[in-house]
Amino acid sequence: MKARERALELFREALLAENRRDLETAKRKLDDIMDITREAEPELYFEACFRMAEVFIQEDNYRGAVKCAIRGIYRAPNGELRKLGIKRLGDILAILKSENRLGELAENMEPTLALIKDDVALHEFTTALVKIARGEKVNADSVPEEFREVIETITG
């Protein structure tokens, strides 16, 4: 079975598990999708990252949701999906802000920062997020333009 066909089958299984509130099974299926699509089907990898982020939100694991969203943005196969990913990450961060949980991003972000080190803009943005989570002031002008609106939303 080709990667795309297997991934679509796993998406169906993950959604069914999620509808049953079997979030552990849904996460396993989404992990499998990410494993088989990382190189072969980057659009499906992107969607699996954001679906996993949504599952993490249902579990109140906001740091996990942000990390998945960042991975999706990092591997976005084109500019349009990257923009969409940034918008979706902004939505996740708005939820964190509204629930006063941005501080959760201050811990254990080093592995994510190491993963994205060669994407200068995403790395600078993620570093700014960690600073905000630690209570440090961040000027939106100091982050890459594509991320400014997100920073303004969570610092404003």
Image (cartoon, helix red, strand yellow):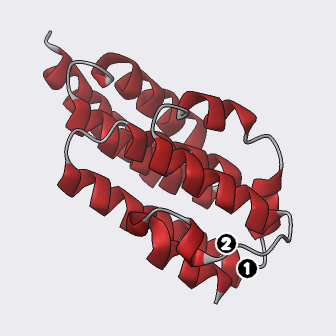
Whole-percent x, y for residue 127 in the image? 67, 52
Residue 96: give its label. 2
The N terminus lies in quadrant: top left
**In the rendered image, the vertical position of residue 87 relative to residue 51, given as above or below:** below
* Residue 35 occupies quadrant: top left
Q: Please determine whether, in this image, residue 64 is positioned above or below residue 98.
A: above
Q: From the viewer's perspective, is 75 left or right of 68?
A: left
User: Looking at the image, which is closer to me, 89 or 145?
Assistant: 145
Mark yes or no: residue 55 visible: yes
Q: Residues within 10 Å of mark 1 (few under 14, many from 20)?
A: few
The residue at the point 41 percent across, 68 percent down is 145
Measured as percent of width and height from the top left, residue 36 is found at 32, 17
35 over 146 or under it: above or below? above
Report how many numbered discs are placed on residues in the image.
2
Q: Which residue is mark 1?
A: 99
Q: The C terminus appears in which quarter of the rendering?
A: bottom right
Q: Nearer the viewer, residue 30 or 145?
A: 145
